[in-house]
Amino acid sequence: MFLHHLIHKISLVDSNLTNQSYFNLFQVTYGGIEFINKRLILYIFFLILISLAIFLGFIGNLLTILAILVNKEFHATNYLIIVNQSIADLLISSFINSFNVIGVFAGEIFFLNRKPLCSIIGFLCLLLCGASLLSIASLAINRYIKICHDKIYNKIFTKKITYLICMIAWLGGIVLGVPNMSGWGGYGYDKKVLSCMTDRTQSQEFGFFYIFCYVSVPCLCILICYIKIFVYVRKYSGKVNMNGTNHKRNIQLAKSLFASFITYFICWMPFGLIYLIDSKDILPPEAMVITTVLAHMNSIANPIYFAYFSLSFRKAYLKVLLLIFPCLSRSRTGLKITTSSHGDKKREDPH
């Protein structure tokens, strides 16, 4: 009887072990080649756009920083804030987006074995995004005072105060990331985006705090500033002397920064809405993947707008490229000489 009872217990243990092994064998591992094969089109689309954001974001923001540092005409205080934002966007492009690519290929095992790294990535993502948005808001206020209240501009935006404003943008990003460290929310591997970020399933209250305090309020402030700028310009541009070329440059910069803000809003608001709606993690992966990649594509926008709206920035970008790649200067010189010689021949032919 005892022997029969012992054999029965051993068989139950074996059965449990077999069932556990079977479960582990078929348990889903998020990320990695086998996983992305199941949604190949979705994650190829994700990888292409994230890779594009890494390349263009790194090159564009680095060029912007170097262009401002190299050119004396960009040494006004407002360009310090642009450098501040470009640094945040550069780090989002090169650092945060790179871990999105690693997450797709290496999968959740890579991050589950490195939980402190996962928390750091999530924290830095919030910090950098917060610093970027607060820098955009600071620039909007800066342009509003410069264009609409020029007489008091130099008293407000001294170099010391501007440096302080830049520091506040980063401190604001840190304040945004700290609540998750203290247990209000959390950081973890997101099984839809295949990377580390704020865990939207832990605290919906933090999601509301982030969206309304750190997105809605700065966006409202930015919108009001640019509406006031364009109303002022439309009302007074033909009636008062606004320093000619300098005023045109200020308006061009305001247009590029406003376009940057609109892009930020379009890129981040869908992500914010999905973040709030999907606190129970019930939406399909496509919703989170598309809104995340759209949000991270925002980091490439500023250099494009600066180049499009500002001749000064185009010249500055070219100057930096010629300093980095002197061979481009020689090829341009050769092209000018060739063009000039052809022009001389054409002028000599009629004689």
Image (cartoon, rainbow, N blue to C red):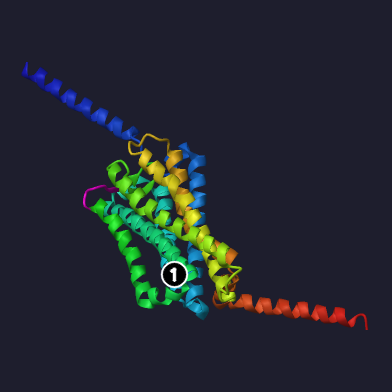
Residue 311, position as x, y percentages in the image: 60, 70
The residue sitting at 39% across, 77% down in the picture is 155
Query: From what the image shows, is residue 279 above or below residue 54?
Result: above
Expressed as whole percent of the image width and height from the top left, the position of residue 171 reads: 30, 63
Residue found at x 45% / y 57% = 224
Find disc 1 in the rendering and name its residue: 83
> Mark 1 belongs to which amino acid?
Val
Q: Residue furthest front?
A: 239
196 relative position to 311: left or right: left
Image-quadrant location for residue 121: bottom left
Of residue 231 and residue 213, the one placed in the foreground of this image is 231
Farthest residue, direction top:
1
- Which secondary structure class fits the magenta region best? loop
Using the image as rendered, state which of residue 322 and residue 170 is in the foreground: 170
Whether residue 114 is situated above or below residue 71 in the rendered picture: above
Badge 1 density bin: few <14, some 14–19, many ≥20, Cα 10 Å? many
Residue 33 part of the magenta segment: no
Does 154 sit left or right of 343 as displayed?
left
How many numbered dots are placed on residues in this image? 1
Location of residue 246 in the rendering, given as x and y in whole percent from the top left corner: 55, 75
- Judging from the image, what secondary structure is the residue with disc 1 in? helix
Q: Which of the pair 32/50 is nearer the observer?
A: 50
Q: Residue at x 50, y 69 (%)?
A: 147
Q: Residue furthest left?
A: 2
Residue at image position (61%, 68%) is 238
Residue 161 at x, y percent in the picture: 35, 74
Range drawn in magenta: 182-187
Work out which quarter of the rendered image holds the N terminus and state it. top left
Above or below, 346 against 263 in this view is: below
Q: Can residue 300 be seen in this view?
A: no
